[in-house]
Image (cartoon, rainbow, N blue to C red):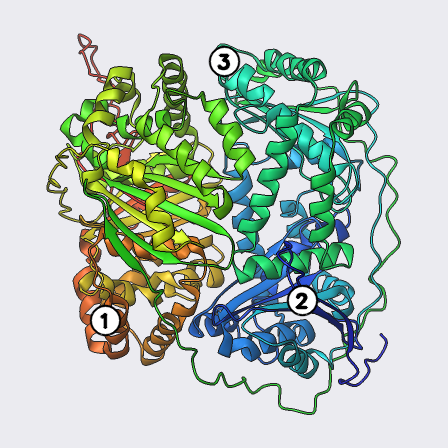
């Protein structure tokens, strides 16, 4: 390797500043002598800093037989380096009040931290240490544990998830054998099993040099400060081997390739994919427009012809592009009674319809306005701006490429869209993938006609020969962690309050970083109101769905068109205890957006055809839940904890029986009875003053108030002793575990808040006891956690994870061991100090964006909190003692009275669970007890009439998330 020059010879490449009100991100760009690119964005609006290190290496740099390396190495980069201990990276950043993560895709891997600005030097020290001083700290044990963690991640996100293998199967058929996009970033299990620690070290030496990296820093910093620290910590790291950009020809299909696979699903799926162009190609934007017209929203052809026509539960199109290639994809999940062959015809008909309708002015205006609005929203946080600069520098060499993107989107024409349709789509072959329920191979759109052919593959030249690890030599003691200096002063955002005469309570705050306004209406009640008539559970969420449809004056499509042109959004939703209306608008378009809000809120059409469609889709979605282990686990856990007769024991979306009973008149009555300003809070955050915005909301005064009777919270089920409940999910690759009991209601300064402090080191932090045990030490899980989740009413304490099926019993043992040990032995002095530091310094990150401010202010109104409640919390945190934490653990971790629930393969997990000493009860996916089969009698008897299990109700019920 070439030796690095001495620090201090850094070159300023460019300085880019804003001119007028143009949409851009100011920055300075430097290059160190070892090739490291440094990009700095200075922004003193909040006392935080975001550090991003992006390496131009993803799964596209891998080879056949060695898939998953880039992602595997992302995990290894958190396992310590010469001067940072095992698991210390997460601990140090958390303790500093920051958050962090890493991600890998086809083309790059990035690592990032958002921290209070006084922690900048610590963040750069951490990133530099793993760039230059990692390999000696990579041990065989760490390697083995992280390999198991990656396998768990694959199990959770691919193998155990409905449709989880779609991307993998499609890539294998679309790209030639050996093309780096022909496998997924997660890689194959057999490759992960084959790889050894030396392979992994070579991968690092080849791709993780400073000359293949971009360090981007944004926030409360100066360029001179960042460059000086970058030179100190990164300057002595050796330049790595040369890395050239890759360019590969687009895949060529000579005919339609039909492929299929069976999955544990209710709805079959068909997907059609055409090869297109890479990121930033001139034809990318017009193809994006085409995908919007074909299947991008309520005005799209697929939505109108399939979703709205009640032929499909889902029908859409998209055009994701990567560095080497793009994919134009149509996806349809038909409703029962229609075949995948029918849906393939519908997709082809959509193209024929496009040829007749062409491209309209509305199509282009909607697309361009939505794009700019999305860009503005993405720049509302320092993390968003920093990652944007990092991405553009990595893939184009120009951090200011946003200007090019805006120009390309503003310039796209009707002719461009028609040209790319003819060039890439019309009459061109595609990959057509069918995903069908297990045991139903006859449901495919068309018989498979393609198998992967490796015969023409030629292995590339060896890129890993002769690599050596040469450590940097420093003139300072790198083992010494930088001091942080004094914490930045954090102030709760200033806010104002007001009320409307009809009862609406308003709270607002000025936020002028981007020219937008966020509004959040919260109406008390939601699913809880259905306790008045549980036979119609699901009515609140169905009413919210209807409010997202047509108004008296406009169709849903009309409203969608106008909102897209404005770059705005209006969405109604309903949860366990509230209904919400969220509004997002640019300041310049606020009046027009509020006019549409008035239409939707005050004058809903409640059309019978819309209701019939939404009800049908809801019923199918409920039936589909049985294929989703996580949803089954959450629903059954609810039933166990809340108990018979409690509305929260029924899913928010209802059951088949309850939704079947709902009529359109029920929706109208629910809206007329419960949609009232008397139970409404409104949060306003954005680039507007109170005096500006309140007159614009005068229409709300016309909203007639009515008394709303919110049912009292009934008594929840009690747990007499800890039991294990098992829901069978045959051949599941993973088991979903939920352990808990009904604990506490929300309280900002009482036992609830203190219990969350107690739980931080048990199961809330990444470095918590539970996660370090199950994920980092044992490799059982991709992540394991515990938390309290109370609201006005008591909510549960929950410990949860998805684990490998063959360690289900061991995982329960480890969960219970950690909870018992914490209850009996309590917190250590070191853990107490870590918790106080981590939570105490995290305020810097809490109030940055409009959404964060809105959430904070909404909580103040919802729970009637004093203006100084944050100061009170900080005082509690500062003064809470080890003895108080230990007393809370004994009080709120009743291990002898918790329910343990698993959704997994009964045949694989039940024998091991029975050995744990707890009573094991088997439940069906609805949470009802499964009756054991009676022994066959010796003498034939008269057959007895036995009630079917279906419809029975469980005694224990509950809730999660």
Secondary element at image label 3: loop
**Residue beneath label 1, please?**
872
**Image point 82% across, 69% down: which residue?**
467
Q: Quadrant of residue 16?
A: bottom right
Q: Looking at the image, is mark 3 or mark 2 nearer the viewer? A: 2
Q: Position of residue 709 (x, y in %)?
A: 12, 35
- Return the disc, 3 or 2, that comes first in the chain's sequence: 2
Q: Nearer the viewer, residue 826 or 3?
A: 3
Which quadrant holds the N terminus? bottom right
Mark identifier at residue 27 = 2
Q: Indicate left or right for 458 with 140 as reference.
A: right
- Return the disc, 3 or 1, that comes first in the chain's sequence: 3
Q: Looking at the image, is mark 2 or mark 1 nearer the viewer? A: 2
How far apart in space, not on screen, are marks 2 and 1 (Cα)?
A: 39 Å
**Residue beneath label 3, please?**
309
- Return the disc, 2 or 1, that comes first in the chain's sequence: 2
How far apart in space, not on screen, are marks 3 and 1 (Cα)?
A: 55 Å
């Amino acid at each position: 390797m070439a030796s690095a020059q001495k620090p201090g010879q850094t070159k300023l490449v460019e300085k880019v500043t804003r001119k007028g009100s143009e949409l851009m991100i100011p920055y300075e760009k430097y290059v160190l002598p070892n090739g490291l690119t440094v990009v700095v964005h200075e922004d003193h609006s909040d006392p935080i800093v975001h550090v991003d290190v992006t390496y131009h290496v993803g799964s596209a740099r891998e080879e056949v037989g060695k898939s998953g390396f880039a992602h595997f190495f992302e995990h290894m980069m958190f396992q310590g380096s010469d001067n940072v201990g095992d698991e210390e990276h997460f601990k140090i950043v958390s303790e500093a009040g920051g958050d962090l993560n890493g991600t890998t895709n086809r083309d790059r891997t990035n690592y990032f931290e958002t921290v209070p600005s006084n922690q900048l030097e610590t963040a750069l020290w951490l990133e530099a240490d793993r760039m230059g001083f990692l390999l000696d700290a990579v041990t065989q044990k760490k390697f083995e544990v992280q390999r198991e963690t990656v396998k768990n991640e694959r199990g959770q996100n691919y193998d155990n998830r409905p449709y989880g293998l779609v991307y993998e199967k499609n890539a294998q058929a679309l790209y030639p054998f050996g093309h780096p996009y022909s496998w997924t970033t997660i890689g194959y299990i057999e490759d992960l099993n084959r790889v050894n620690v030396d392979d992994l070290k070579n991968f690092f030496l080849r791709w993780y040099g400073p000359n293949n990296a971009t360090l981007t820093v944004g926030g409360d910093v100066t360029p001179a400060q960042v460059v000086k620290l970058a030179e100190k910590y990164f300057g002595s790291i050796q330049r790595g081997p040369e890395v050239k950009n890759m360019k590969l020809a687009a895949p060529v299909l000579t005919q339609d390739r039909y492929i299929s696979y069976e999955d544990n699903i209710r709805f079959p799926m068909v997907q059609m994919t055409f090869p297109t162009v890479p990121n930033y190609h001139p034809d990318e934007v017009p193809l994006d427009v085409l995908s919007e017209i074909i299947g991008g929203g309520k005005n799209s052809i697929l939505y109108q012809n399939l979703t709205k026509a009640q032929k499909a539960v889902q029908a859409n199109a998209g055009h994701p592009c990567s560095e080497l290639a793009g994919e134009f994809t149509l996806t349809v999940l038909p409703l029962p009674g229609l075949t995948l062959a029918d849906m393939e015809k519908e997709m082809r008909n959509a193209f024929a319809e496009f040829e007749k309708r062409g491209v309209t002015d509305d199509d282009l205006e909607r697309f361009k306005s939505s794009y700019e609005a999305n860009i503005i929203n993405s720049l509302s946080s320092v993390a968003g701006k920093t990652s944007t600069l990092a991405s553009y520098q990595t893939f184009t060499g120009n951090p200011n490429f946003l200007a090019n993107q805006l120009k390309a989107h503003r310039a796209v024409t009707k002719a461009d869209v028609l040209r790319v349709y003819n060039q890439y789509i019309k009459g061109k072959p595609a990959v057509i993938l069918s995903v069908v329920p297990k045991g139903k191979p006859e449901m495919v759109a068309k018989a498979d006609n393609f198998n992967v052919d490796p015969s023409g593959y030629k292995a590339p030249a060896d890129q890993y020969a002769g690599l050596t690890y040469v450590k940097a030599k420093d003139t300072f003691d790198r083992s010494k962690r930088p001091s942080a200096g004094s914490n930045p002063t954090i102030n709760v955002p200033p806010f104002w309050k007001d009320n409307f005469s009809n009862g609406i309570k308003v709270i607002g705050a000025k936020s002028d970083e981007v020219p937008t306004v966020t509004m959040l209406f919260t109406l008390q009640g939601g699913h809880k109101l259905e306790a008045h008539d549980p036979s119609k559970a699901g009515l609140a969420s169905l009413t919210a769905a209807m409010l997202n449809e047509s108004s008296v004056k406009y169709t849903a499509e009309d409203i969608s068109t106008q909102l897209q042109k404005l770059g705005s959004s209006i969405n109604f939703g309903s949860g366990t205890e509230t209904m919400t209306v969220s509004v997002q608008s640019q300041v310049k378009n606020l009046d027009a957006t509020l006019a549409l809000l008035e239409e939707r809120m005050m004058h809903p059409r409640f059309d019978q055809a819309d209701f019939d469609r939404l009800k049908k889709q809801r019923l199918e979605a409920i039936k589909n839940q049985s294929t989703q282990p996580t949803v089954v686990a959450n629903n059954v856990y609810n039933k166990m904890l809340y108990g018979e007769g409690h509305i929260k024991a029924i899913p928010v979306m209802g059951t088949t029986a309850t939704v079947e009973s709902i009529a359109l008149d029920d929706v109208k009555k629910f809206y007329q009875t419960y949609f009232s300003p008397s139970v409404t809070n409104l949060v306003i955050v954005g680039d507007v003053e109170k005096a500006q915005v309140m007159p614009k909301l005068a229409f709300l005064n016309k909203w007639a108030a009515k008394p709303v009777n919110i049912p009292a919270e009934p008594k929840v089920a009690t747990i007499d002793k800890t039991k294990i409940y098992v829901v069978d999910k045959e051949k599941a690759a993973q088991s979903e575990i939920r352990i808990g009991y009904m604990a506490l209601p929300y309280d900002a300064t009482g036992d609830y808040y203190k219990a969350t402090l107690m739980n931080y080191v048990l199961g809330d932090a990444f470095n918590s006891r539970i996660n370090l045990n199950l994920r980092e030490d044992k490799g059982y899980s991709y992540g394991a956690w515990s938390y309290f989740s109370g609201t006005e009413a008591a909510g549960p304490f929950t410990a949860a994870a998805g684990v490998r099926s063959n360690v289900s019993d061991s995982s329960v043992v480890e969960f219970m061991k950690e909870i018992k040990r914490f209850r009996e032995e309590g917190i250590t002095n070191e853990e107490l100090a870590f918790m106080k530091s981590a939570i105490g310094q995290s305020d810097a990150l809490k109030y940055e964006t409009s959404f964060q401010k809105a959430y904070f202010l909404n909580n103040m109104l919802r729970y009637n909190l004093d203006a100084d409640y944050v100061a009170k919390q900080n005082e509690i945190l500062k003064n809470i003692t080890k003895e108080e934490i230990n007393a809370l653990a004994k009080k709120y971790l009743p291990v002898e009275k918790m329910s343990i629930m698993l959704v997994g393969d009964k045949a694989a997990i039940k024998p091991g669970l029975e050995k744990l000493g707890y009573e094991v009860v088997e439940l069906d996916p609805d949470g009802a007890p499964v009756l054991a089969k009676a022994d066959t009698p010796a003498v034939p008897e008269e057959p007895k009439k036995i009630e079917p299990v279906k419809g029975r109700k469980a005694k224990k019920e509950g809730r999660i998330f």
